[in-house]
Amino acid sequence: MKTDGMKTMMQILQDLTPLNRAVCSLGYDRAVDYLREELPFRIISVPSSRQHNGWVIPPSWDVEEARIVKDGCTIYDGTVHPLCVIALSRSFCGTVSLDELRRHLHYDHRNEDSIPFHYRQQFRSWERDWGFCIPKRLFDQLAPGDYEVVIRTREAPGTLKILEYKHPGSLDFTIALGGNLDHAGVANDGLAGCVVGIETLRRLQGRKTRFTYSLILSPGIIGSEFYLSGLSQSERSRILEGIFLEMLGSATPLAIQESRRSQVSTFHAMKASLDQMGLRYRTGPFESIIVNDEYVWENYGIPMVSFSRFPYPEYHSSRDSVEIIQETSLNQAVEALIRAVDRLEASPMVIKMFEGNICLSNPQYDLYVDYGQVALGDSPSDHQRRMRCLMDFLPALDRPTSVKAIADHVGLSEESTLEYLQRWATKGLIDLL
């Protein structure tokens, strides 16, 4: 889908995929400037002088020249693809033996013609080496002898840039969508999730919503860490839940990964959305499908569901190009998110207003649904068992949760659950927003 005057998701991918979007780089900065023309993002700039929990912002780094020369002929041009030089490679010029050269070469063990993504130095900028990523076919063909190596990079103090856009709602709660804008030279890993997030927020423009919906695009892991650590406790407490958008452009099946926490409203909304669309997908516990920025958000107390098409065979290689992106896949992801928003907006949120456990049979409340006594010959119905689960579950709520999520947890319909919860609200035990 194309919003009037804006570039399509595929156009954005075609324009930004070729950029060398290292964590702090000219390519990343160009992507930031480009996307601000598509959505009025706020830029959060974090200078290299700031450190947090041992996380260090790497220097600004760009490759100016990179090649391997044998007998006067260039056998490898490290500028033809952003993955050809390892991320944050040191500059190096000199003559090396074949054995020494091979110690600085990295290849994809899954495919002899692709170039792998070597990213670790972006998180360990205090311990860096020089090196190339090359196809395995070339690695196997290298002949004995000496090689001239040239890697010239331009470095300066780095500034980590995070993009944030908010669609305001009437309630003081935010649903966060996240994506990774780095991952140089690849399309699906990170960037596809970013364009899905942008299109989703575009479609919400002009719509009145109860929740605020925010989109945060940043470099993987380190960006989420600095974004969340830069918020006050009050600001973080207003972020109710989140969905991390990952690798949503490939033809592979969809997956929804659960939060570490139970009864997360976004998880239930996404499942219901995909079921309604009749799409094939799988679910799994936290970290059973993918491990990415979700764990950073979770460790700041914010439940973060993952929405992805992982795994896919081109992951972390030069084969992850625009050619593997299916426009249908992108559109399905956007539609699923919009339908999930519809469900989040329609299902009231339950906020607990008491501590401990309520004596529900007390006439003051009169909320107890009799379960019977098995020893006296009573045989509770399935509905009674599920109502018992609901009564026991409500005192355990530690955060606002949708009626839909609670209903799914106890196995009751959303309608009957809401009807019962309205009785709790009448007694002042919960708020329904």
Image (cartoon, helix red, strand yellow):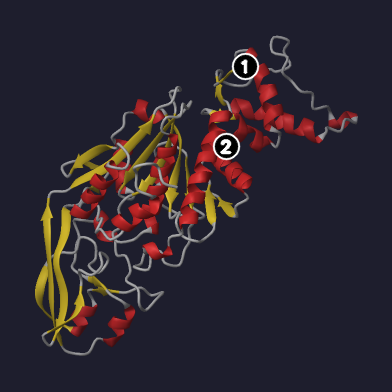
Most distant residue in the front direction? 4
* Residue 352 image-quadrant placement: top right
The image's mark for residue 263 is: 2
Task: Using the rendered image of the protein, determine whether residue 397 is visible from the camera's viewpoint.
Answer: no
Where 135 falls versus 206 (above or below)? Answer: below
Q: Earlier in the sequence, mark 2 or mark 1?
A: 2
Where 285 falls versus 75 (above or below)? Answer: above
In the shown orientation, is residue 82 left or right of residue 148? right
Disc 2 crowd, CA 10 A, few/some/many (<14, 14-19, 20+) = many
Q: Nearer the viewer, residue 276 or 380?
A: 276
Amino acid type at image mark 1? Ala
Residue that label 1 marks: 425
Q: Nearer the viewer, residue 319 or 104?
A: 319
Check the picture and name the quadrant holding the C terminus. Answer: top right
The image's mark for residue 311 is: none
State the residue at coordinates (31%, 32%).
231
Q: Nearer the viewer, residue 233 or 66?
A: 66
Amino acid type at image mark 2? Gln
- From the top left corner, tell me how far across and down residue 420 is, in percent: 69, 22
- From the top left corner, tell me how far across and down residue 314 is, in percent: 41, 67
Real-space CA distance between mark 2 and mark 1, rounded to the nearest whole angstrom: 20 Å
In the shown orientation, is residue 61 left or right of residue 10? left
In the shown orientation, is residue 12 left or right of residue 267? left
* Residue 339 image-quadrant placement: top right
- From the top left corner, tell me how far across and down residue 80 is, in percent: 23, 70
Most distant residue in the left direction? 94
